[in-house]
Image: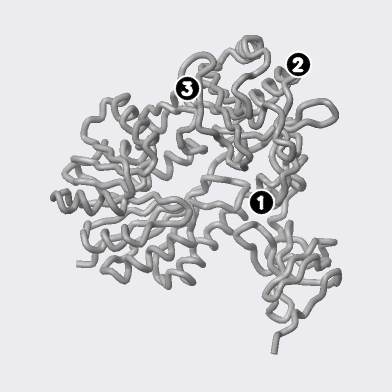
Amino acid sequence: MNQQAPVKKNDEIYVHFEDLTHEGNGVAKVDSYPLFVPNALPGEKGKIKVVKVNKNYGFGKLMELTETSPDRVAPACPIYDACGGCQLQHLSYSGQLQIKYKQVKDVLTRIGKLENVKVHPVLGMDDPWRYRNKAQVPVGDREGGLIAGFYKHRSHDIIDMEACLIQQEQNDIVVQTVKKICEKYGIYAYNEELHKGTLRHIMARYGHKTGEIMIVLITRTKEIPHKKMVVEDILKAIPEVRSIVQNVNAKRTNVIFGDETKVLWGNEVIYDYIGNIRFAISARSFYQVNPEQTKVLYNKALEFAGLTGEETVIDAYCGIGTISLFLAQKAKQVYGVEIVPEAIEDAKRNAELNGITNVEFAVGEAETIIPQWYSQGINADVLVVDPPRKGCDETLLKTIIEMKPRQVVYVSCNPATLARDLRILEDGSYQTVEVQPVDMFPQTMHCEAVAKIMLKL
C-alpha cells in the first residue's frame, strides 16, 4: 500500500524547523515527512504554505515566523531574496560557521561511520564579505538597455545588479563599466531563445595582491561591433586593466566558455600571489576564488603533510599547481597529475615563474598515471588529493591502499564525498586522524575541509 504524504499542496500549517539542507533550506517535519522551506533557520517556528508534495518530501513557502532564531540577521544585500548566488545572508556569520561544522561532523558520522574523528572548529574569515576575485556575469536586454547580474534561483531570469557583496569591489566596477560601454556602442546581449545577439557574459578577474585586472568578453559572434572603441573606452575608464580577452562561444549551450580565446589588448595573463608563490592566471585558468582563505587551506594541508625536506610527494588533481608548489617548498620532490592539458601548461609555467625545480607535472587521469609512476619505482611518502565535488575515483583509492604512502592529505570541496572516500581508506588500513573545515565561501552553504590520514602501522 502506498503511504500518503501527511500534507497536501496549498495546505497552510504551523511547523518547527529542526535543521538546514545542503542547499540552505530550513527542514521541518510533519509525522516524519520532511518539508524544505527557503529562508527558515533551525530553532525557528512559523506558518508555511505547502507548494509541492513528492512521495518522500515536500517544499513549502515561509508565510510568517512566530519564533525567530537569535542567529537571524537582516541580509545586507538588497537583492538577496531574488538572487540565487548566496543562501545564508539571513544567518549571522558565527551561526554560519556552526552550521558548517555540524554539516562536516554529521556526514563523517552518517556516511563515513567515523564517530571518533577530531573535527576542529571551522576556520572563518575576519571579514566575510567582498572575497571573490572572479566574476562571471550573464548579460541580457531589458527595455532597450543591457542588464548584467546573477540568475534568479532555479531559473534563467537575470537579476540586474549594481553590486555583489561577496565580489571584490573592482569586479563590480568592471561589470558596470563594460556594460555601459557596450550599451553606448549598441552591442546587443545574447538571446538564449532566439540564439541571436553578441554579448553572452562579462568576466572579470582581479589579482588580490597585485591589483591587476583581466576582462573577458564572452561573445556568440567572432566580431564585436566597434571593438577598437570599446577597448579604448575600457582602458580610459579602468587604468588597472592588464588584459582584455575575447572568448567566442557560438553554440546553443549553458556552458560559459567556447573553444576560441584571443587577446584583444595587453597580456594573455595577469599575476597574483598566494602566500609568497606567484601565479600566472589566464582567462580559463582554474584559480581559487578566495585567495585569503586558500592560503589558510593550503597552509593547513602543508601542516598535515608534516614534511621535513626528505619526502617524495604526489599531488593528484593538481590543477595549475597551486598545492604542488606549496608542497615543493618543504618536500624533496613533488609529482603532480591533472587531466586538463591547459592546467598542466599553467602549472609548468608557474613552477618556472617561481624558480621551483623539484616538481614534475604530467597530463592524464590520476588513477592511470599514479600506478604507472608506482611501477617505475616512484613511491610517495605523502599523497595529496584535491578532487572535484564527486570525490576521488575508486581506482585511485585502491591504488593509494596498494601503494601505502605513510600519509594522505585529502583537500575536499564536498564533505559528503570526503566522508565516503575516508570510509574506503579506513577499510584499507588507514586511519583518519583529524579534519579541519575551512570557510572558503562565506554567505553560502559550501564548506571545504582538509583531512589528515595516516597509515596504520
Residue 448 position in % (x across, y down):
48, 51
Would residue 97 appear left or right of 286 to someone viewing this image?
A: right
Q: Earlier in the sequence, mark 2 or mark 1?
A: 1
Residue neighbourhood size for the residue with mark 2, other residues' Cα within 10 Å, grouped as few (<14), some (14–19), many (≥20): few
Q: Are marks 3 and 1 in contact (CB under 8 Å)?
A: no
Of tags 2 and 1, the one toward the viewer is: 2
The residue identified by callout 2 is 184
Would residue 41 appear left or right of 387 to someone viewing this image?
A: right
Q: Amino acid at mark 3?
A: Thr
Residue 175 position in % (x across, y down):
66, 26
Picture quadrant where residue 356 is located: top left
> Distance between the Cα atoms at labels 2 and 1?
37 Å
Q: Residue at x 75, y 30 (%)?
A: 147
- Could you tell me if residue 163 is visible in this image? no
Assign the N terminus to one quadrant of the image: bottom right
Residue neighbourhood size for the residue with mark 1, other residues' Cα within 10 Å, grouped as few (<14), some (14–19), many (≥20): many
Q: Amino acid at mark 1?
A: Leu
> Distance between the Cα atoms at labels 3 and 2?
30 Å
The vertical placement of 108 against 444, above or below, is below
Q: Residue at x 66, y 24 (%)?
A: 173
Q: Secondary structure at mark 3?
A: loop
Assign the C terminus to one quadrant of the image: bottom left
61 vs 254, nearest the viewer: 254
What mark, if any, has residue 210 been given in the picture?
3
What mark, if any, has residue 88 been given in the picture?
1
Residue 327 position in % (x across, y down):
29, 41
Q: Amino acid at mark 2?
A: Lys
Picture quadrant where residue 69 is located: bottom right
> Distance between the Cα atoms at labels 3 and 1?
30 Å
Residue neighbourhood size for the residue with mark 3, other residues' Cα within 10 Å, grouped as few (<14), some (14–19), many (≥20): few
